[in-house]
Image: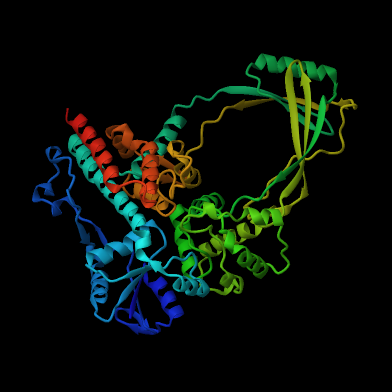
Amino acid sequence: MKLVIAEKPSVAKSIANVIGAHKKTDAGFEGDGYIVSWCVGHLVCLAQPSAYSSQYDKWRIDDLPIVPEHYKYEVIKATKAQFNVLKVLLARSDIDSVINACDAGREGESIFRLVYMKAGCKKPMYRLWISSMEDSAIRNGFDNLVPGEKYDNLFAAACTRNIADWLVGMNLSRLYSCKFRQVFSVGRVQTPTLALIAARDKAIKTFQKEKYYTVCIKTDDFTVVSERINDKAQAEEIAASIRAQKSCKLDSVIHKEKITLPARLYDLTTLQREANKLYGFSAKKTLDALQALYEKKLTSYPRTDSRYLTNDMKDTVRTLLSALDPSFVPDEKNFSRMFDSSKVSDHYAVIPTLESASKDINTLDVSDIEKKIYALVRAKFLACASESLVENITTLTLTFDGITFTQTAKQILLAGWTKYAIKVKESTHALLEGDVSCDTLYPIREVLIEDKYTKPPAAFNENTLLHAMEIAGTDALDKNIEVERKGIGTPATRASIIENLISKGFVVRDKKALHVTGKGIALLCAVDSEFTSAKLTAQWETKLSEIAQGTYSTEAFLEKLTQKLCAVIQKERA
């Protein structure tokens, strides 16, 4: 008998249906030589400091740093009953091997391994690694199970990250809470994210707007606008001189064909950004909807950081394109751009499933939010294999008294992928009234001076913050290494980081805008600058990637981190 452990009940049920485990039991599903059960997220976590010594029951600076020689793990109380179910199953004499069917990634590896380890299991384990919950994908995954030991380094990277987060959180939260006599929560990922928002708010607050002017020349055939003019008297002098001329000639009329390729497929962060931009959905709302679509077998695995598909998927993708739109004819160059196995780590980009193509989404048990997210995924998939957008860009230029006036007009020659793009409102393009040339003298109908002001940077919303989190600190990353997660957090955790900052009162959401609170500023003022910088996160991610590849050790990583923490604690004590 083989025991299969999934990450949640809905996934376990889907797997059980495929492999023939149809009998429902108190522990899960059973049949055809399998027992299928599940975790409910993390069931085991690192123990609190008090598990090592009762002296840590109280928070005292003198007790820091807290650096255990051996780390203890404990069963999470809220889900202890489910852990006990799995512990009993793992110990059953008729179970000869265990299959890890938790999410295929660093976090999923950790969820399963900690249960396996805490239960004291020594039975052979195997890994199911899939990117879709479709029946065919599950069957293929079970046909290609690999020994669990292949992912030992991935588990080591997960453990190292968890311990590092524990060390930072437990030591620095206690340090600054004791020093400033108020409760502070310091985290490796939440504190740099908070710093990003605070820096943007400061830039807005300290921004001093500057007034400037533009001169606008209108004819019956075109409208040209000057470059920025800082002096009003100069703008008035130029406008008066132009009016006196009563007509003007263009210096240049340049026609240029512009070809715009379709954007890449969605990874989770890009989809969250677009859903926020179009519909105002929070990152968490989008992730929850996409997770539901995945479990309903309508889209592929949600928590991906890749915007590519693997090279061996070309035939499958052609079939899927035809199933979604029988009249669709792919553009071969853009179709080929969708595939690059070297840029897929755990999971390929988010795409619709073949199963979804055979169903009417409006007749299924899906929420309105899920429908909108599915529509975005479907539209992006079709757009990526479509023809490029082709535009004719016309740039008109004239110069007067050393000031350049321009107008840029666009004419769409081939809509290409844009016919699949989902827009809340149609974009407008400046159009010319007719043909224009440099040889013609055009009567001036009107000359206007427009008062304008420089604008402060916009407050972060979840769209722009997610992008900032994704690229933060990446200058510090080794360009030659394929890092599993870049920037601050991971695709799977960025939504919860934002929600966590809000729930703890460090950040407030004002409509779509995100702003730091007084409590958040107090935290940033207290914490050593190294732990508010994304640079540290980027350095960690590089080393965690090396641990996952077996080229760097957990011991070396934690030793360096401990030295850093000790130095900060010592400095604050002085």
Reply above or below: 120 against 231: below
- Could one spot residue 521 in this view of the protein? no
Q: Nearer the viewer, residue 447 or 507?
A: 507
Image position of 235 (left or right of 59): right
Residue found at x 58% / y 59%: 311
| Extreme residue in the left direction | 54
Quadrant where the image shows the C terminus: top left
Where does residue 335 sit, x and y in percent of width and height? 66, 57
Residue found at x 27% / y 62%: 114
Residue 198's image quarter?
top left
Reply above or below: 443 against 383: above
Where does residue 407 sit, x and y in percent of width and height? 75, 32
Number of marks in the rendered image: 0
**Way the structure is coloured:** rainbow
Q: Nearer the viewer, residue 50 or 507?
A: 50
- Could one spot residue 445 in this view of the protein? yes
Where does residue 238 sit, x and y in percent of width and height? 74, 17
Where does residue 169 sit, x and y in percent of width and height? 26, 45
Reply above or below: 57 against 566: below
Residue 434's image quarter?
top right
Q: Nearer the viewer, residue 189 or 322?
A: 322
Q: Nearer the viewer, residue 524 or 247?
A: 524
Residue found at x 41% / y 76%: 13
Image position of 358 (left or right of 41): right
Quadrant where the image shows the N terminus: bottom left
